[in-house]
Amino acid sequence: MILPAERREEWNALVARCPHGDVLQCWEWGELKSRTGWTPLAVAVERQGRLAAGCLVLKRPLPMGMSLLYAPRGPIVDFSSPGLWSELAEELRVVARPEKALFLKVDPAIPAEEERVAEVLRSEGFRPAASAETVGGTQPRQVMKLDLTPSEEDLLASFESKWRYNIRLAERKGVEVSGNCRREEVEVFYDLLKITAQRDGFTVRAISYFYDLWDLLVARGLGRLFLARVGGVPVAGTLAFILPPQAWYVYGASSNEHRSLMPNHALQWAMMRWAKAEGCTLYDFRGVAPERAGEAQGPLAGLNRFKRGFGARYVEYLGDYDLVFRPAGYWAFQELLPWVRARGRRKRAQEEV
């Protein structure tokens, strides 16, 4: 069944109590993505009048009436119950038929070592995806996670000594962190994000997307904006999501000024304390570089070092799995997509000239 909006809170409670639940499966995330060309479908299974499993599916239209389906960090199901998973998988197939979907992509937050779950996914026809780019990129496969159950004192003591020093340095040097930001300060954060993007060589979404994030998640208690200031001047900011018992560090930004005062360390500590006070037992730093034999690989290796300094552990997920409904269309889509994207890049380059 597709759940109606009246059961939003019940849906979010299902996501929250699932060990691998994620805020990207919340009702509000579907509303957010509906403003960027996707249509959300909350596919659910009930048992004895209570939600037992679900999967927030995002639909994107394709030519000739076709579509693709993507479930970010879904599905939300107890994989140890094969019968429940089979029932949900059948519901997903039923939903896909009238949508003329080529495939459904899922990327559950399940550690790669849980091979049993991979077998359960395969039992319903899901197969490892050849590429995440079929939906424009998915969620990070490698993350860092921190256990928040120790006391604040013990948590701080578990950080590397340099990280503890940097947190105290920020405090001594007058770095002030605010976690009670207002909607008007979204623009302040966005200006810092643009500086970061220019410095580190990545692109950012339009500011309207961040106002939507505020209205649909932060204003509804599913996120919070933090800003660090020196002498009243904003120097860094972060945006975090929360769905107790978990919290996620999603966006970080900083100016080119006062970086030696360690505002980023102060912000992380402030977010952890906030998450802990809100009842969270797990803090997810999200994306990092892949590690092999304990060594981070590639240009993002610095993220691993920074996040590990807070005592976080490295986790690699199973990755993307596709359930193909129309093999010929799926193959054509996979083959044509790189050409379409290359053509779009060339066209944009010519327009810029």
Image (cartoon, rainbow, N blue to C red):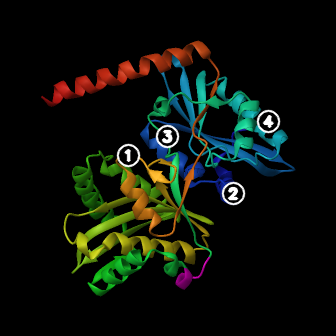
The residue stretch that appears in magenta: 150-154
Give the amino acid at mark 4: Ser
Judging by the rendered image, the residue that carries numbered circle 4 is: 86
- Identify the disc placed on residue 260: none
N-terminal-most mark, 1 or 4? 4
User: What whole-number distance in Å separates the C-alpha atoms at marks 1 and 4?
Assistant: 39 Å
User: What whole-number distance in Å separates the C-alpha atoms at marks 3 and 2?
Assistant: 20 Å
| Residue at the farthest left position | 353
In the picture, measured across the screen, residue 146 lies left or right of residue 231, that is: right
Q: Is residue 45 magenta?
A: no
N-terminal-most mark, 3 or 2? 2
Judging by the rendered image, the residue that carries numbered circle 2 is: 19
User: What whole-number distance in Å separates the C-alpha atoms at marks 4 and 2?
Assistant: 19 Å
Tell me the residue at 59%/49% (across/down): 25
Residue 285 on image: x %, y %: 48, 60
Residue 106 on image: x %, y %: 60, 38
N-terminal-most mark, 3 or 4? 4
Q: Magenta region, mostly helix, strand or loop?
A: helix
- Secondary structure beneath dot 1 equals loop
N-terminal-most mark, 1 or 2? 2
Q: Quadrant of the N terminus?
A: top right
Q: Quadrant of the C terminus?
A: top left
Residue 49 on image: x %, y %: 83, 50
Give the amino acid at mark 3: Thr
Q: Residues within 10 Å of mark 1 (few under 14, many from 20)?
A: few
Residue 166 on image: x %, y %: 34, 77
Judging by the rendered image, the residue that carries numbered circle 1 is: 298
Judging by the rendered image, the residue that carries numbered circle 3 is: 138
Q: Is residue 256 above or below residue 124?
A: below
Q: Residues within 10 Å of mark 2 (few under 14, many from 20)?
A: some
Residue 270, image quadrant: bottom left
N-terminal-most mark, 4 or 2? 2
